[in-house]
Amino acid sequence: MCGIALIVSGIRIDTSWLPFDSTSSTRKTEKLLFSLDDLKAALRRRGPDSVCAKKLILQSEENLISSFMDDGVSSSERDNADGIHTAKLHFFGATLQLRGINPLIQPLVDASGNVLVYNGEIFGGFDLESDCNDTEFLMRTLGECCSCGSCSAGQCVECGKSTVLGVLSAIKGPWAIIYWQDSSRTLWFGRDGFGRRSLLVHWPTEDDSTFLLSSVSPVSPVQFAPEDETRNGIGCFSYWEELPCGIYNLHVDVSKPSGYLVAEVKMHGYVNSMLTELIKWDRISVEPSSEDLKTCCHKLSRGQRSIHLASSESVPNETGSVQSAIPVPAHSLLDALKESVLRRTSLYNVYQAVTSGIRQEEFVPVAILFSGGLDSMILAALLDKCLDPNYEIDLLNVSFDGHLAPDRQSAKAGLNELRRVAPSRKWRLVEIDADLSDLVFETSHVVSLINPANTYMDLNIGIALWLASGGNGWVSDANISDNDNNHVRIKYKSNAKILLVGSGADEQCAGYGRHRTSYRRGSWLGLHEEMRLDMQRIWRRNLGRDDRCIADNGKEARFPFLDEDVIRLLLNMPLWEVANLDQPIGIGDKKILREVAKLLGLYEAAVLPKRAIQFGSRIARESNRKNFGSNRAANQASAGSVRINRKSSFY
């Protein structure tokens, strides 16, 4: 993982080619003051292993462009020469190294003058050796690409070489990238088709011509914005925007006769047909026939009877009947999810030679953001099947109401169920307790992390994720299957660098309450349209924010439910096999995931209702009381969608 950023100055950038309206150069944005040190500090939290910066200088003279890396000599001497115009591209990289053997420092600069900062993982699309660093691999692969600059396909029709578009479109896994191709004087940047890695952009405006890209905002805008600009966001645009998913390029040229350096930003679609189909999120089988529903209900009834027997203490050996009663699609999804978890938890140097005096049996390479709910229980059971049995697994659970929070109670129940299905694994429930009134500084910090998201709901989710991923909590002194409240708790901080997160399960399997509303209003087609909307906006509403909050602790979030193969498999299934919202809550919503849980022996987790982290941890309740006086007043004000303002008692 890496925190990446770029600051471009001295180039007159035209954004009129972009297919969205928010890039008008005449708009005004909020003022955001930060130094290069502020930016480096924010990136370092994401990538604590190394932080580095490289400055590329572009100069135009007599309609020719030359480029060179800043050698430390002031370029102002060159700027003063008549007829010479200078631009600066300042690249930043902060690395948390999880792959490869040798230490790697970004930005990378190759012998041809290409520059790369990359925040991502290559889980497929290319064949990498187990000891290969994917950033180094990507640098070599991009360096072999066509540089004609006019290619709009995966392969150049003139020279036959791969194109930058083709290489980036082929990556399976999360990524955000900034890449300078020196031979074509072209800057490439973008993020994967689902936005699993954050990349923020500040487009040039009339009052601020600087172009910036960054994984994270260094400071909170409410710290510097005038009062009239913070009130409900009226009067100005956010300084930062989530970069819409896609691949962009910026070709630098010389304007005649002025000699100024100019560029146009263009957005490209992905040239991988399989990926574009996933992004469109079209499902062939949406509306079932009466016979389809009859068959589906028969399977459900049969499965429920078998599960009741299997989960009964008097009949402990009915697992075989459960397996045969579960429909085939659930078996296929279980296999795909297992492969997805395996891809995200194996063959990384985080597992190699133990460092800092930590014995192997005490080293925890992977943790799970754990509520004890359906999604996190499935991930935990699958991780047990994929991870070397010598390693412990940390289950990170946050509560703002001690042992009374619903998520803490379900986490303890889930821990006992995991101990039943995987008794040889050492599970460690990390209880992260928080009091909102004590988090004044931390809350202000999270406001910066969620930016440009700016509602109380975003803030509540961001705080919960930030605290949970930090892994700083308490563990029981006993690893036995009884009430942990009877045991002494000791202080503990998880050192896991990889965190598995259940994002994408609700969107793809109809887990939200709004899905039931859409189904009631528009039947199966209405449900499908709502689910597609959720998947096509997940980059803007969820994943960028979540990535920034988790990565700020030097941890990398990985999303097994958003693996390309998992998404494809679910899309190829009839919608009524995925969910049946004629059935009650806890049965019909996320039906297929409940069947997967049963295949894993998680019978108690299989019937748990959906509960969002802000409610399960009870941070929403505490936030409502603090900022609106009571839950009732907050509900009347639709507190979740209310924008944060500077007068909030958070500050």
Image: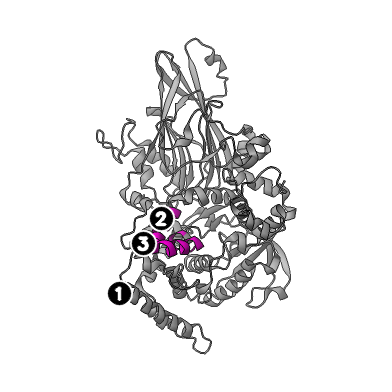
Q: CA distance from mark 3 to mark 1?
A: 23 Å
- Of tags 3 and 2, which is closer to the observer? 2
Give me the residue at 53% from left, 57% from top: 351
Farthest residue, direction left: 158
Q: Which residue is mark 3?
A: 569
Q: CA distance from mark 3 to mark 2?
A: 15 Å
What's drawn in magenta, residue-wise? 507-534
Front residue of 193/393: it is 193
Q: Amino acid at mark 3?
A: Leu
Q: Amino acid at mark 1?
A: Glu
Q: Earlier in the sequence, mark 3 or mark 1?
A: 1
- Is there any visible trace of residue 633 in the rendered image? yes
Q: Which residue is mark 2?
A: 532
Q: Which residue is mark 1?
A: 291
Q: Main secondary structure of the magenta part?
A: helix
Front residue of 447/622: it is 622
Farthest residue, direction bottom: 314
Q: Does 375 sit above or below residue 252? A: below
Q: Position of residue 13 (x, y in %)?
A: 46, 26
How dense is the environment of label 2, judged by Cα within 10 Å: few (below 14), some, or many (20 and up)? some
Q: Amino acid at mark 2?
A: Arg
Helix, strand or loop at label 1? It is helix
Helix, strand or loop at label 2? It is helix
Front residue of 404/51: it is 404
Give me the residue at 45% from left, 54% from top: 534
Give me the residue at 57% from left, 33% from top: 29
Q: Quadrant of residue 477?
A: bottom right
**Label ID, residue 437:** none
